[in-house]
Image (cartoon, rainbow, N blue to C red):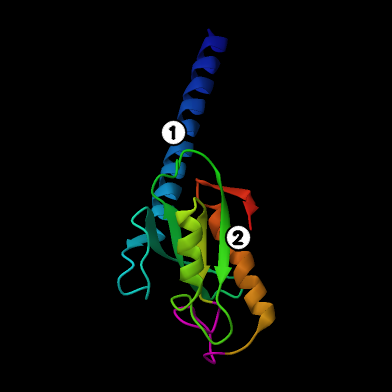
Amino acid sequence: MKKKYILILAMMSLMISEQAYTQTKQKEQSKQTAEMEQITPKGYTTFKVSDNVTMYKVSFKNQYKMDVAGHLFIPKNLDQSKKHSAIIIGHPMGAVKEQSANVYAANMAERGFVTLSLDLSFWGESEGKPRNAVAPDIYAEDFSAAVDFLGTRPFVNRNRTE
């Protein structure tokens, strides 16, 4: 009788643990969705973005706790149940993502890639003071944080970010 009681308790514990795990996963997925705000290219680009691409406004923290702003471009026909390669595109010095990086990101998304354009720290919508500072070591961290951010997307193969 004791063994049967212990077995029932173990099964109940397992079911409760599984339910807690499922709830945690659901919270993580809804948080990930909240980090991605779908936007239209109007107001964010000076060029035409293909109707075959969906654009999202995103942000994430770098190791210095600064918000890094970006635009995520996803092909509309992308099977989000599978993992895909992703490309990160930064802007040249003296520019912001809307002036150049978005052009390349939108073009690569139209060709089937998940792409993320970003404003480097101290530039555009990203945090950092003094504004327009040149800090290559922090820029490198911004790209590293972008890889980490993309790796949290369920449709991105973390080992295939370029």
- Place of residue 75 in the rendered image (x, y in percent of width and height, measured from the top left): 43, 51
Residue positioned 61% across, 50% down in the render: 158
Q: Which residue is mark 1?
A: 19
- Place of residue 65 in the rendered image (x, y in percent of width and height, measured from the top left): 56, 74
What's the distance in space between the residues labelled 2 and 1, CA to CA? 30 Å
Residue positioned 38% across, 72% down in the render: 47
* Label annotation for residue 147: 2
Amino acid under label 2?
Val
Asked which secondary structure carries label 2, the reply is: helix
- Which is more N-terminal, label 1 or label 2? 1
Which image quadrant is residue 16 in?
top left
- Place of residue 27 in the rendered image (x, y in percent of width and height, measured from the top left): 41, 48
Residue positioned 53% across, 52% down in the render: 152
Q: Is residue 113 left or right of residue 56?
A: right
Any magenta on residue 39?
A: no
* Label annotation for residue 59: none
Depicted 130 relative to depicted 7: above or below:
below
- How packed mark 1 is, by other alpha carbons closer than 10 Å (few <14, some 14-19, many 20 or more), is few
User: What range is drawn magenta here?
Assistant: 120-132
Quadrant in which the C terminus is drawn: bottom right
Depicted 14 relative to depicted 47: above or below:
above
